[in-house]
Amino acid sequence: MSTATTILALDGVFDTGLAAFQDTLATARDLAPPALRESLNSSVSSIRRATHTAHGLAIPTVRADALPTPGFVFVPALGAKTEEGIADALAHPDVKRAVELLRTWQANGATIAAACTGTFVLAETGLLDKQEAATSWWLAPFFRARYPSVALDDSRALVGNDRVVTAGAVLAHFDLALWFVRQRSPELADTVARYLMLDPRSPQATYAIPDHLRHADHLVMLFEKWARENLDTGFSLEQAAAFVGTSERTLSRRINMVLGRSPLSYFQSLRVERAAYLLRTTKLGMDEIAARTGYDNAATLRTLLRRKTGRTASEIRRTNHLGVQD
């Protein structure tokens, strides 16, 4: 096994993901002391000779199957963004060949890392089975259904160990690249982050929109309907199960299977979403917002907002619908 690093770019790779890895590593190499520069070199490899990004840009690559086993492999996101598109992409012969190659490389000692929808490619190898992993928050239900043996934690931006590392949605490619640099020099990683204006990433839970989680499970959708109609009155698993038409045990098991959390946890996420929306779009005071989201007082809501989003109520109020402070 060599100590080389390669970025395995499948045809139709997500442009930003590939560029994030390349630019972060190139910046680190330019800023690194001479003794570290070689360890930050990387190549871009591919399964086929002619490889293009999702936007059709040609990528200069080397054939992955001609490389000796690298020490580290990045798998950027696929260009697909929907469940249907991802399923189609994963069925492509290139992905099948990549899966076989990744298994071989990892068996020979390589560390494999993937971000965003690239985590689906890594999951296809089976290397994430019985391991904790991250993926794009909006595809978490689809990921859980497809890979039930993986311990998915969609609230975190980056999850890993010394053999497999996974990162969340799009900009987590930068987190993953910085993680790689940090293993070689924490000081260099901090310098690169400053050069690229990369602030410490909040947990994915900060960005997740419960209403946009992709789930086609009828029981889960009925539970969400009940929850949204009862945000101001409080949680009752008994009442929710009666509305859905199933037992409390079945409801809890299904919610956990699809969303990876308990009914109460999801209910609280919907409350936080509603409270944050009211903070950004109205001039209502915290006491009134607390009442509309089922909390006895503003102090309890403030604490929950800070714990769930990593931001104070005042910071949320100053942000626009994109989550960017005015």
Image (cartoon, helix red, strand yellow):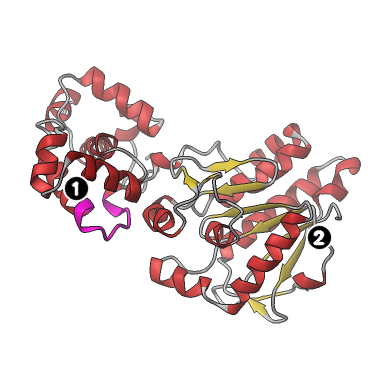
- Report the residue at 30% width, 37% height from top: 262
Give the residue at mark 1: 224
- Report the residue at 37% width, 27% height from top: 307
Quarter where residue 49 is shown: bottom right
Looking at the image, residue 153 lies above or below residue 117: above
Q: CA distance from mark 1 to mark 2?
A: 47 Å
Q: Quadrant of the C terminus?
A: top left
Q: Quadrant of the N terminus?
A: bottom right
In front of the other: 18 or 229: 229
In front of the other: 225 or 130: 130
For the residues bearing labels 1 and 2, Cβ distance under 8 angstroms: no
Q: Whole-percent x and y of residue 280?
A: 26, 39
Instruction: Kindly identify the amino acid type of the residue bearing the numbered disc 1.
Output: Glu
Instruction: Kindly identify the amino acid type of the residue bearing the numbered disc 2.
Output: Thr
Q: Is residue 318 magenta?
A: no
- Report the residue at 63% width, 45% height from top: 196
Q: Whole-percent x and y of residue 171?
A: 53, 51
- Report the residue at 37% width, 54% height from top: 141
Q: Which mark is drawn over residue 307?
A: none
Looking at the image, residue 43 lies above or below residue 137: below
Name the residue furthest bottom: 50
The stretch of residues the image draws in magenta is 211-220
Quarter where residue 50 is shown: bottom right
Tally of numbered discs = 2
Q: Whole-percent x and y of residue 267?
A: 23, 38
Q: Which mark is drawn over residue 69?
A: 2
